[in-house]
Amino acid sequence: MGGDAAAAEVGGRQVPAVSLEGLEVVSALGRGAKGVVFLVRDEDLDQAWALKVILRDNLEKKSDKAAAKAGGGRGGSGGSEGGDEYRRIAFEQEVLGQFDHPLLPKLRAVVSEETEKILGYAIDYCPGRDLNSLRKKQTEKMFSDEIIRFYAAELVLALEYLHGLGIVYRDLKPENVMIQEDGHIMLVDFDLSTKLSSESAQCSPIVPDPVSKPKPQAAKPRRRFSPFPGCCGSGISPDYSSSRSSRPGPNSIFPAAPGPLPAAGSGSGGKSNSFVGTEEYVAPEIILGDGHDFAVDWWSLGIFLHEMLYGTTPFRGSNRKETFYRVLTKDPELVGEATPLRDLIRRLLEKDPRQRIGPEGIKAHEFFRGVRWDTVLRIQRPPYVPPPAEELEAARRRDGGGGRKKAPFDVVAFVEGIFRSGEEGERNKEGGEDKGKDGDEGGNKDDHANKRAWVEELNEHPSKPNDFLDF
């Protein structure tokens, strides 16, 4: 960036403003609903970031679609300028700029180019991918209790910090838990989060939950439902009300970020009435539409722990309706002998949020016996430390050895091409042109080939198919 680097004001803070030309684009990491995430490197600082480049045209389309669905048409709630979508991105940037916690991302830079086509910003890069990918690499595609304890403890600290800021996360799942270069987690993807009112954030009591002994128990891609799908697997948004009508614990070692955050639309009594989440992780109170608060995150933690232990979520049905029915009426089948972990899962999956175990009860639970919460991030040794990103190391060696640098890369053209090929694939599917002998198998292969071709055009070496994530 150089010594006279420009800066942009985001949420009252100065954030480096970088030019796309000043960044080395190392690889494409994945795509989301509105843009593409790149691994980039600031050569002056020798820092690697995850750069999100968002197409303004996609923001317009998403807002128009949501407005039409709500009966407003173009210029309705979405507006011709995609106002709601832009507000979500601005809100995300402001919150990322205020995070001050080792398990949460920070806003590292914003793209300085003001164009009619894109906007972009950079956050921390995590070379270890996500916990879902790591779980699937295990022999039985599940983790041991000891490994689950490590990741669960860090998640509790991250959620406790968010709740101290008045933020309800609302989308906890393994795909949103990334592995940093030192093996510790980083919680990402805030596009379904919301900021509750100051009344709820500051005055909700945290009462230690009684810890009971463990009780014996009987033996498809996830779909997110939100009026505005997530952007590039990350983001944060204001609340959007449906038509239906904390504070840090005493053991928290990270202070809340200074300065107020704008409260997104919330229901009466400091609760949100938005109908958002990921189907298999959504809490009963969200489905019922009676308003929800921080307790929904502890429910999602229970689903998360169940998936880490069994390799599957407990309430998944053949469709959304059946999944929601199971969430509301079924108890989780915690197969196996009674253990502290199974007891914790049972108490987290209490359907009544008033009876659900809270942060202090979680931290005092038998499953976390021996965990020193005030030093957990400094003492605990991660069970997995990812190797350095090969492409990033190659770029550093190339610079250090005075070798040939990559030719300038047209980020805008790349992103436009990704979505153009995706739209063509969708049109082909609708017309039945790409179905193979096994239904839509041929279409999936074509889409995958298009996606891979775009990535290979970016990289000097062919990318493996699973290197590119479609969030």
Image: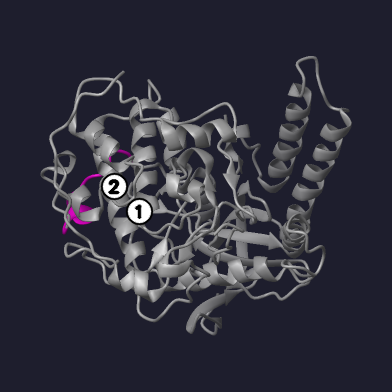
Residue 375 location (% of width, % of height): 16, 57
Please give the name of the residue rendered at 64% of the width and 50% of the height, measured from the top-left corner.
32
Q: Report if residue 46 is visible in the image.
A: no
The span from disc 2 to disc 1 (Cα, nearest Å) is 7 Å
Q: Which residue is mark 2?
A: 356
Range drawn in magenta: 374-384
Residue 153 location (% of width, % of height): 25, 48
Name the one closer to the observer, 302 or 132: 302
Name the one closer to the observer, 408 or 235: 235
Please give the name of the residue rendered at 62% of the width and 57% of the height, measured from the top-left corner.
25
Q: What colouring does the structure picture have?
A: one colour
Q: Secondary structure at mark 1?
A: helix
Q: Report if residue 447 is visible in the image.
A: yes
Residue 259: give its label. Answer: none
Q: Residues within 10 Å of mark 2 (few under 14, many from 20)?
A: some
Q: Which residue is mark 1?
A: 295
Instruction: Check the picture and name the quadrant holding the N terminus.
Output: bottom right
